[in-house]
Amino acid sequence: MTMRLWNASRTTGTRTAICLFLMGAALFTVSPCHAQGPAPTRPDLEIQQISVVGTTPQVRIRNRGFARSGATRVKLVNIERDVGNAGGSQVISIGSLAPGQSIISKFTRVFRSGTLIAHVDFENRVAESDERNNRVTKVLRDRRQRPDLNVAISKIDKDKDSVLVFVTNGGSSTSRTTVVQLWAFAAESRELASRTFTIPPVNAGEVKPVRVTFGMPDATRIVMARVDPFNQIAELNENNNQDAKTAN
């Protein structure tokens, strides 16, 4: 029995048939079949890498196919955009790429943290031999030295008129002195009382418990706490500064 395989050449643009002549259960010989034909003539764009220079991402794109690609576009999306990022996505155009050619696309948007997804030819303008390698994901961590305060209400003791809260600094630097504000709400979300108290600096990674005498009215059903309510501290994440708990 004879089996025919094809060996494609990227440099000559041709393919050569190689025949396997089976001579027994475990014996075979290999020789050219003396037949040639055109190689696949489609490009194949791929994202090779997402890198970040400072806070600006760069995407390396390569045509690993056998034909020149047409002009297309590449999109960079940040799907977990935090405060401080200038926008969630950006699209830029790229020109035609010869087989084997690579380019680096530089984006102007600033992404300090989040999950970045680069997608070349996301509109399917180019007919490719492989459409499965057009996307790459990269998780980007914020490297700035900033605190990240968050507050959690641990216990509400209405009999002793006190609230136990934990203030945590999950960032990379010590916070300044700030405040935590407490609110007491009735069942219909009507504000009954509030109090503000001072929190001394919290070191990176530190958890600081604070018990506060509140003066809660009997009708209190929900207690809410917010650390740094006036945004006086620049943090890595401003979206985790608040907590609420039902008062039993």
Image (spheres, grey):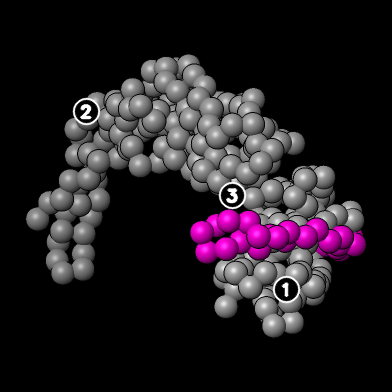
> Is disc 1 placed on a helix, strand or loop?
strand
For disc 3, the marked residue is 139
Q: Which mark is residue 59?
A: none
Residue 236 horizontal/vertical position (percent): 73, 49
- 16 or 198, nearer to the observer: 198
Q: Residues within 10 Å of mark 3 (few under 14, many from 20)?
A: few
Residue found 66% across the figure and 41% down from its top? 83
Label 3 residue SS: strand
Residue position for label 1: 163
**Amino acid at pointer 2:** Gly
Q: How far apart are labels 3 and 1 at the CA level? A: 38 Å
Q: Bin the neighbour count of mark 2 within 10 Å (Cα to Cα): few under 14, some 14-19, many 20 and up.
A: few
Task: Answer with left or right where residue 155 lies relative to residue 169.
Answer: left
Q: Which residue is mark 2?
A: 37
**Picture layout, residue 47 above or below residue 198:** above
Q: Tell me residue 33's x, y (percent).
A: 19, 39
Find out whether the residues at labels 2 and 3 contact each other: C-beta distance under 8 Å: no
Q: Which residues are magenta?
A: 182-204
Say what amino acid the circle numbered 3 marks: Val
